[in-house]
Amino acid sequence: MGKTSKDKRDIYYRKAKEEGWRARSAFKLLQIDDKFNILHGVTKAVDLCAAPGSWSQVLTRRLNENYEKLKEAKSDCTLIAPKIIAVDLQAMAPIEGVIQIQGDITNINTAEQIIAYFDNEQADLVVCDGAPDVTGLHDMDIYIQSQLLLSALRITLRILKPKGTFVAKIFRAKDVTLLYSQLKIFFTSVICAKPLSSRNSSFEAFVVCRDFNLPEDFNPDSLDTSISEFSKLKGVNGYIAPFVICGDLSQPDSDTSYPLDFEGQKFEYCKPTQSPINPAYEEAISLLSVINLGKDSASCTLQGSSMTIDDFKSQYKTKKRS
Amino acid sequence: MISLDMNTDVLAIKCIKNYVFIGIGCTIYVLNNIRCKLEIKINVLHPDNIYDIINKSDDKLIVYGKKSLCILSISFRDDFIRIEQIDEIIRFDDWIINVKWLGALSDPTLTILFANNNVYNFELFSKQYFNTHCKERCLLYSGTIFGQSCKNTLIFSGTVFQEILIWRVMHNSNMKFSEVLHRLIGHKGVIFSVLYNPLNNLICSTSDDRTVRLWKISSTLINDLNNAVWKNIEITLQTTMYGHIARVWKAIFLKNIIASIGEDSRICFWTLLGVLLYKIEAHHGAPIWCIDISEDNIVFTGGGDGSVNSWPLKNINPLQNHVLLEINNHMLPKHIHIINRIKNKWYHIGKYKIEDSKIFSIKWLNIDTILVCVAEGHLYIIQFLKFSIKILSEHVLPTSRQRWVTSACVYNNLLVCGDRIGSIYVYNLQNNEKYPVQSFRKIHGQFGVQSCIIMNCNLITTGRDRTLKFYKFCDISGHNPTIEFLHAKTMPMDWVSKLIKHKNYYYVLGFKEKEFIIYNLSLKRIVSKILCGGGHRSWDCVMYNKLTNFAYIQKKQVYIVTISLDTLYNPPLLNAFHTKQINCIKILHILSKHHYILISGGEDCTLFISSIIPKSQSRVKFIDFFNGHLSSIKCISIFTVLIDKNISKHLIFSGGGRAQLKLWEITIKTNTANNNTLSNENISCKDLLSYMLHGLDKKRNKIWVGNELIYNTDTETRYMDISTINNPQNMDNILVFIACSDGCLRSFSYSIQTNQIKLINTLMNKNRCILKVHITMATDGLLNIWNVISTNDIFEIKNVTIDGKHDLSLHQSGINSFDIKILNNYEYILATGGDDNLLNLLIFKIIFQHNEVLSIHVVSSWGTISIHSAQITGIILLHNRIISVGRDQKLAVHKYSYNNSKICAMFLKEINLCISDVQGIILCVNQKPNTHLFCVYGKGFQLLEV
Ligand SMILES: C[S@@+](CC[C@H](N)C(=O)[O-])C[C@H]1O[C@@H](n2cnc3c(N)ncnc32)[C@H](O)[C@@H]1O
């Protein structure tokens, strides 16, 4: 396995690096937009589960364009600059014009924090690309993903303007119809879209929910206790959202293997645009080179609450030297 | 519908008395720990999978998984166990994290913790509950309930965002939320498990950050802890333990030891002070999901490979070591000394010189014969007589840089030698031939052959290339006996030195880095590792009864290590299957009513052969497995060469990642098999060839920039599907069509006689990954039909037009599954299932025009998108039914009819499946009328009767 094997397997991974996107996910949002025009006219947006930030990059770019266009058309100085709020569990490198919150979107406190930023204003668009770091237990991954989607919906219900749009990742697996039905309560149109940049073999897709419309007798605060309250909202039973492929066939397909010099262009290796910041496994990985943690006898124990991994490493090195 | 058998992740294990309760899929297996016997197997939670099994004294079992729960009653009587499901399955709206039955048996109130950080006190009879919410409203990955009664209960919950929260369950309170009493902060990722042990006042947690942490509850009020002083106590991080190299799923307390299990397939045993005692690699690289310990100190683990293993808790004393003698020798050996043991004493019998040259090696061939290798590759077979020696024959080892024999054996009239550069040579002793009659150059790579062994009338060689190689003897009593290479198996060690059989098990001995490894081949498990400095030493190892003695030389001293075999391992309770997702299964047809043979391949790069015995309790039996694929196996095609009552012969084409195609020949002797068992003695598998489109990595076209390898220009093509047909012009010739991920349809021609495969055609079809071939289907949802013309010198593939067009658009995106049947002379029915949820039926007609041009006319079609809500990955067309399965874990049955040139279908029923990530379905022929036996596969498999 060389440095380039991922480049070879995945054309979008390669293209993302070449075009300066932090993740190949950028193409998914772009392809959804091509089909549904979801970014048209948007100036206030929320990007949930945003790290490493490629969707935020797309949003900044497009929202600024929208803003420029509006400025030209109106030459009105009361226009407010675009607003983007990005939230993730993981730390994210800064992006100009994006307000960042590090937190758990399933936690009601994080939700309140986002709402507080909007301060009586409303968002034109909420997007959520949330997915768990898969455990390999599909049932569990699917459940967690559905909870991310419902958490995003709970936030959306509080801040999205009427007729606004909500786009979220969804796993097309068991019980997906229940989620479609629940979304259908709040949006006139719910479509399941699969961008060409998602793999054929993956069960990932995106729900594009348009024309937001909060039912009159519905109080979004009632969901604050728990997302499981959603399960009491049954909506249209067993609704299967129409399935639509986004991106036309002239765009590359993520399952196809392309040669590195695809389309006659000379291949040049690009480094990843943004590597993860403080991932959970960082300390454990840093031990690999010191004590080769994979070995049967290797371990590291930190005593008490103040000893750090660096203390261990320096102790280890002095011990080794003597 | 009956779910007959299943193999998938094992998520739950519980030991009660002498029994082990195992949750696999929706089924509970009860095994007798002492007799290792399956006592009971029941489906309890269908279609949900069992995530945990909890006992309430020895009377009740609480079984739960996902959003469902059920209660079983158990009773033990002497040597007998009974299980009964008391009530219906209770289904909740949210995911269950943990359940406890805290009160008395007479008070059936369950405490249930859900993933949204709330707790129900749930009355089993009335189904009434009281709900307490923690003030911190967030999603949990883990949690545990602790208390002596349901009136006094604490919750430890593990969040997505690095924290462990401790809070109390309320009763009839008018407060809306329960306050967080403590927040344990320190982990750097998701909390995967948390556990509280009141005996030592420790909290143990595991996480995404790959650590196990112990938190000390410091209080002088220890005895009072249960009584609500929790708010005032102090909890501090005591130790942080790193030992795993991937996520740590869970840890449990075993008396004074902590055992943690992880995604890295390892169990780590720690003292309460956080010192690592030892690690075990337990499930062939698959994650370990669950662990429990029995009363007699046996640890049980269940994993992602569908197996359950057991491990006696090791006593931690170091292995016994003796230093025997010191040797000091600087002279080159030129003589053979013979020493004999008579009545416990060693006598020096004689000293002989064969040639005036250094003796490179001596190998025992027999009780009284040896093979001596001297300079220039001269070999002598020498027999010991009473007071002299006799040279039986002389041979010559072909030249090489390191020209000496490293291993040898004789079988009938054949001498087999392995040399230092990894070649195997075969000599015919009958005619006193000096030179080899057969040679396998560098079959064991450049570092040498380590041993040649005869076992069950087969030859097995081992080498420093991590492999065991299997051969069979042909025409062994005839004039021209030869050996034939069958296949190789990769071992978890660098140098594979020896294979021995001891009490029904095969053991492979060898070295990895500085350790000596004993590996049980039958159980696929490392039995022991002994630090000895590495494999270049002189050594020997013998097993007798329950002991193993390993002797080696290190720093000029002889050491002996003795280990007792049965303290080191127990046989597994359930056997392992694929460690990762299964991508394809095919049925191999044999003329037997008692079993079917399955060939499967998956993401774990391994090919498995298993058999289904419809009439036994555990219906699927794994027979053997084969390595050789460098990347995942994605497709299999079987071509039957010969089939009759006694024997059948099949060619298996397997393809997958790295554009690799492998060909195996499987021979099955059905005549010798008794009705119930078909073991690996009845089946032989020969690795015929491996063909890589781009050649091996080292030979590939690389572009170097400075000292750094930058890239090679070849595409990483994957083989997605294979289809094979006999060349109608030439029966010895098989045409192989492969759908490739680079959009090409490649055709190969294989000759049975010469065992050679040739690429004969590359059809650049489109810029899209082709998913299926037979007719081709790709990720763009288009169907193409091809006409293959093959005569002796022409091979041509032509597109057949469908109603005047090149292709037919059937789906919006990928076509993931299909089945096709002939209806009558010219009409076919084709069923396809797509990425777009669409199930499609198509009737088409082949039209022959006068100038022999074919074309296709679509007669009628039908489709539905309202049955599946995710990709359809498997389809089977039966006489008037269509069976489809999808990633939504559903199996749907439709009835179809074709009248007056119109096809139409009607939905009949659907069934929820237990296994996830469904990749396909196959039909195993069934004897019963009106029911069919199916095997659905994906993450594991499920056998169903529909
Ligand atoms: C597929 S990535 C998002 C990629 C992003 N859209 C981009 O274009 O760069 C999914 C993200 O979901 C985040 N996530 C998962 N669970 C979360 C939670 N409970 N709260 C916030 N973020 C979460 C993960 O940290 C991860 O960064």
Image (tube, coloured by chain):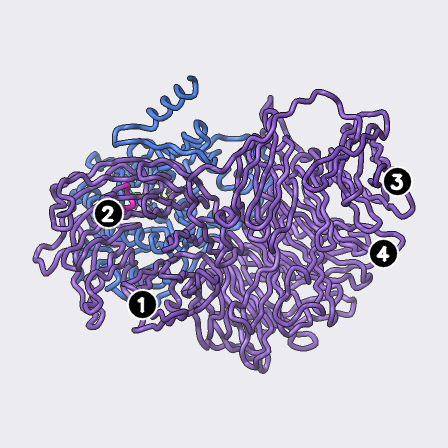
Chain colours: A blue, B purple
Crowdedness near tag 4: few (<14), some (14–19) or many (≥20) residues, C-alpha within 10 Å: few
The nearer-to-camera label among 1 and 2 is 2
The nearer-to-camera label among 3 and 1 is 3
Q: Identify whether B773 is placed above or below B80.
A: above
Q: Identify whether B395 is placed above or below B144.
A: above
Please, what is the dominant secondary structure of the magenta stretch?
loop
Residue bearing mark 2: B199
Nearer to me, A201 or B756:
B756
Q: Bounds of the magenta span?
A: B158-162
Residue bearing mark 1: B70
Residue situated furthest front in the rendering: B343
Amino acid type at image mark 2 = Leu
Q: CA distance from mark 1 to mark 4?
A: 64 Å
Residue B663 is inside the magenta segment: no
Kindly indicate whether the residue at mark 2 contacts the one at mark 1 (C-beta within 8 angstroms).
no
Residue bearing mark 4: B477
Amino acid type at image mark 4 = Ser
Lower position in the chain sequence, tag 1 or tag 2: 1
Amino acid type at image mark 3 = Ser
Q: Residue at x 59, y 61 (%)?
A: B610
Any part of residue B99 in sight = yes
Residue situated furthest left in the rendering: B174
Kindly indicate whether the residue at mark 1 contacts the one at mark 3 (C-beta within 8 angstroms).
no
Q: CA distance from mark 2 to mark 4?
A: 71 Å
Any part of residue B718 in sight = no
Lower position in the chain sequence, tag 2 or tag 4: 2
